[in-house]
Amino acid sequence: PAKKVAQWKYTTCNYCSTGCSIEIGLDENQKLVTSRGHAGADVNRGKLCIKGLLEHDLFNSPGRGTEPLIRDKHFHPFEQTSWDNALDTTAEQIKKIQKQYGRDAFAIISTGQLLTEEFYTLGKLARGCIGTNNYDGNTTLCMASAVSGYKRSFGSDGPPGCYDDFEHTHCLMAFGSNLPEQHPIIYWRLKEALEKRKFPLIVVDPRVTMLAQFADIHLPITPGTDCVLINAMLHVIINEGLQDQAYIDAHTQGFEEVKALVQDYDPKTAQHICGIDEDKIRTVARLYAKAPAAMSIWTMGINQSTHGSDGVANINNLNLITGNIGKPGGTSLSITGQCNAMGTREWSSCSGLPGYRYLENETDRQEIADFWGIDPEFFPKKRGLAETDIFPAIETGEIKGLWIVATNPMTSMPNTGRIRKALEKLDFLVVQDVYQDVEMNQYAHVYLPAAVWAEKQGCHTNTERRVNLIDNALPPFANAKPDFWIFNQLAKRFENGKRIHFPDQPEQAFEEMKQLSKGRNAYGKERTLDISGMSYEKIIQARGIQWPYRESDTGLKGAPRLYTDGKFQTASGKANLLPIKFVNNNEQPCQQYPFWLNSGRVVEHFHTRTRTGKIGNCNKFSPTPYMEMNPDAALELGVEHQSYVRLTSRRGDAVVMVQLTHRVPRNMVFIPFHFHDCVNRLTLGLLDPHSRQPAFKQCSVRIEAV
Ligand code: SF4
């Protein structure tokens, strides 16, 4: 209750990428007692979802790590140790493995949950000191396809739109995105815009999700066939002359190739592949193309597929061909998953070097080596393995040691039975996490207890490129340490760590990032990541600033949109229109496995429940896994509501409670992905060839009553 609060502290939510500004309330004993949305914040305007409202409960949640732990074998009991010993042992083991098997035999997997200054510092350590090329983030499981699709179409990553576009659009198409449960406050922004001014909402999703229930047109698509639907829409748009030819001629390249390809995707043919009625395809295509401004949003329904990167590139095709990039209400806006997945894309060095620099680019390598004061030859010349390729490399013995930072692949990766077997083969595993009881710790040799959320300081970038601040409201719990401190201390134990400057404070790291971003001039144009005009003070004042925001920029608004002048980050300055041919490589229902298996989020939980599973009221509303099943299919199999069934796929099996609902079609079941040893025992590890993102949402199962 507000009356108990002696002091409010400003911070930003640490769950999803919406980026809500929060105030957390401390009582007179400096105990956190409540959270509330910041009324003056552009993003959430005083609102929070259930996770944000209960976020203060994280500080004293059960299972928190209190001291570093160590053991020789993963099946021995852990012993408490000092930070010095835990870090010395970690550094020694990394060096030993690298000496015996080569630098890349030690891999690092981080997360989209860290703060940007932490990503930057981990990048320095991984790329500049440890020198492994096998460093990636769990963002490969969520946003890698969006990154890849943006780069292929526009020449650079970075979502071009913003939430304000809801206020200006005349047609919104949502692909595989269930905003009310995944990003509740973005949904609230959309709903507010719809209440002020009616425009068509089209939802493409095989389930009747909450968002689909609000849609004017719901397109219950066959999983993994979005490219076919978009090609058929482009067929209608181009053949009826509805394209924006002036925009295409001035700002794109490749139109003739796309035009030729989509001739094979007439709505009648497409209907048989994607399952959407041909007349509906025509209606939707005309609505979208004729709208004065139209926008597309998408989430994991597009990204988590073997066609994920193609799906994103084809959404971009749709928007470029209809002239809907860089104008109010006309955009391609990927709704990011994690709170700081954008920060990892910008600054982490997971797939390259900081500030959207790439290992393949000699100038980029030289710039970072000069800035850090090391030899550019220390950097590899191309990207190493993605997270999804690191585990197979452990299986084959190519990788012998692993450092896991704030992620939980034993629950989040597809086909988790295989992950468990891979972990057993490691010579050395170090796990750095807020919680000691995280599943990954079962295989750890060293455990490093990390501070949580507002026990530390640094920035996030949200879905609409808005940089906001997490401020430390409390000191770290027990002997846990901020990730920033852990990276700095480990760096001191490597030779290059003595050459490279590792600042003591996150704000000093932010100053380095600002310098590295100044006048970023990729492909000869000044319209990429530039945060040189920002400061912590300005960020708090503005409750977040959208990049690019240069030193010369005035006011505190930043840039709401990219590509407003129709110039892109390609060599020619034109956007690429890419012909996207559909190849049906989905695992599909068959006689032996007759149901599609789909997975996704529930509003109460985040990721693998390492945090929300510890919060009483989140658990109370969503305590156990369940499976949505269509009542007609259940009747056929003799399965009852709230009974238990065994699901079996080609990878494994899982027992789940049944919830009967018409939200899923007769040939599909849906299970939330948050729970350990559940849906990801069954899912498929087939990868997108461009992004290496797994096809979580296209696999098949059979169901038996137990
Ligand atoms: Fe946090 Fe996302 Fe909820 Fe906002 S919508 S309070 S950012 S979890």
Image: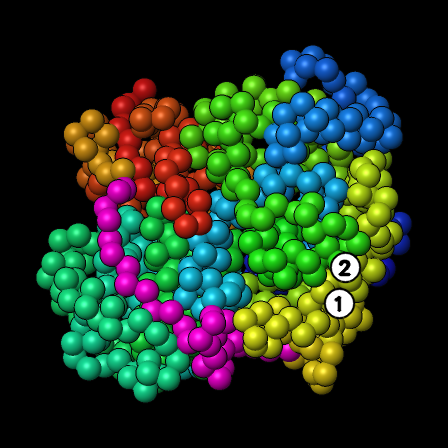
Seen from the viewer's position, the closer of residues 559 and 390 is 390
Tell whether position 571 is magenta: yes
Q: Amino acid at mark 1?
A: Gln
Q: Position of residue 345 (x, y in %)?
A: 58, 56
Classify 653 as above or below 335: above
Q: Is mark 1 within 8 Å of ligand 1?
A: no
**What residue sits right under mark 2 in the picture?**
371
Classify 29 as above or below 406: below
Residue drawn at 76 percent across, 34 percent down: 449
Q: Earlier in the sequence, mark 2 or mark 1?
A: 2
Residue drawn at 35 percent across, 46 percent down: 306
Seen from the viewer's position, the closer of residues 165 and 254 is 254
Q: Residue 450 sits in which quadrant?
A: top right
Q: Which residues are magenta?
A: 558-586
Tell whether position 629 is magenta: no
**What residue sits right under mark 1 in the picture?**
515
390 vs 30, left or right, is: left
Seen from the viewer's position, the closer of residues 655 and 347 is 347
